[in-house]
Amino acid sequence: MSPDKSLSNIFDPLSSPPPLPASPAPAYTALPYRDTAFHVAPLLNNKLGEVELETCDGKRFLVHKKVLESETVFFHIYYGFVPLWRVQSQPHNLEPYHVSQTTVTAPPPAITSSPLNLLCLPKILSNLRHSPPPPPNRSESPPPAFSDLHLPPPPPPLPPKDVNAPTPTTSPYTWVVPETASVLEAFLSLIYPTGTFAPNQLSSLDLTSKVVRAAMGYQSSKALSSSRDKLGEFIQNSPVEVYALACFFKFTDLAKLSSTTAMIVQPNEWTQESRALMGRLGAEKLLNLREERLNGLKRILERQVEKDEHSDTCVRRGMMEHLWQKHRENVKEGLKVESELLELLTVDLRGGHCGDCLVSLGETIRKCLLDANSLPKTI
């Protein structure tokens, strides 16, 4: 018997389905629209990426899904877990209409003139109302939606301006992100292999802080670690700003490190933005550190010259105490919160003082320096 070469067995449901692939199919197959000018499209192993990211300022990036999945928890969760129905589903939007042979819908019962059928009239009307529509006429022309399949897909629409989180648009491979182009490029430079992007992308404190925020949003430990370490390099020039950012992002170790330099800045020189970022608790900690150190330094400067058996009988003891009193007052006038009282070592000892009294003075200065060194330097 010759094999059946007709078209009737193309959609035969009795034939065995194609085997599933060994690895799960990707969750989505719609690639981004390529006919556009990308702001940044890095090469990885001499290949372009397949995920399009559009920033809030309208710049388009073509990046690699593999990098996003491996370096960010956000995209790993989005692309990594494939629903079972996506693996088993088959594309059917372009298949011609046909009636399955396994599921046959019985035609509605005919209405006859038998008196018995009048008792089933509600059921008959219900079956007529819920019966499927007849199949379309194959002789009709195809719908207009399939007439232009040879044309490229239209570009995605412009992103909304109030995006505050990564949002997929027309395709799950095309995203609108809330970052600007400079922030996104700096963020990508931290998660891509070394040499893909130009070095030293984090050139300012403002940019670095925004990259830290992006790294926390995308949950990228690699980018967060690098950008967080970069914040420490701005402590010398912007200590209060770094301290405020450390309080805002809850970087406890960085907040302690920057508080040593931030306490030097007078509170009236703090910007409103820094006050808002550090919050009430962060501001109180820094103010308490300043107050504790200043009170401790003033208390140390109240120390008198050490007394011994010789001090009660020395005729030049009063001259030494007068010298020490005058020197302490001079140090108090220019006292700073970061001072370690090394200014006490600059005392002028000219004038023929008693040697034993000078020993007592040296012991007093030594104890003052030790007490000043024991004062807290961080929050």
Image (cartoon, rainbow, N blue to C red):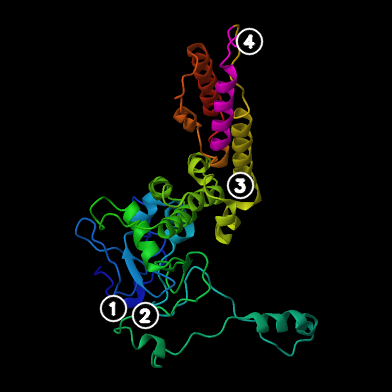
Crowd rating for badge 3 (residues with CA inside 10 Å; few <14, some 14–19, many 20+): many
| Residue at the spot of label 4 | 312
Rendering coords of residue 106 (x, y %): 59, 76
For label 4, the SS is loop
Q: How many marks?
A: 4
Quadrant that contains the N terminus: bottom left
Rendering coords of residue 275 (x, y %): 59, 56
Rendering coords of residue 166 (x, y %): 48, 64
- In the image, which residues are magenta? 310-331
Q: Is residue 326 magenta?
A: yes
Q: Is residue 342 visible?
A: yes
| Amino acid tagged 3 | Gly
| Residue at the spot of label 3 | 282
For label 1, the SS is loop
Quadrant that contains the C terminus: top right
User: Could you tell me if the residues under marks 2 and 1 are in contact, i.e. CB atoms within 8 Å?
Assistant: yes
Question: Which numbered marker is on residue 35?
Answer: 1
User: Could you tell me if the residues under marks 2 and 4 are in contact, i.e. CB atoms within 8 Å?
Assistant: no
Rendering coords of residue 155 (x, y %): 37, 80
Question: Which numbered marker is on residue 310?
Answer: none
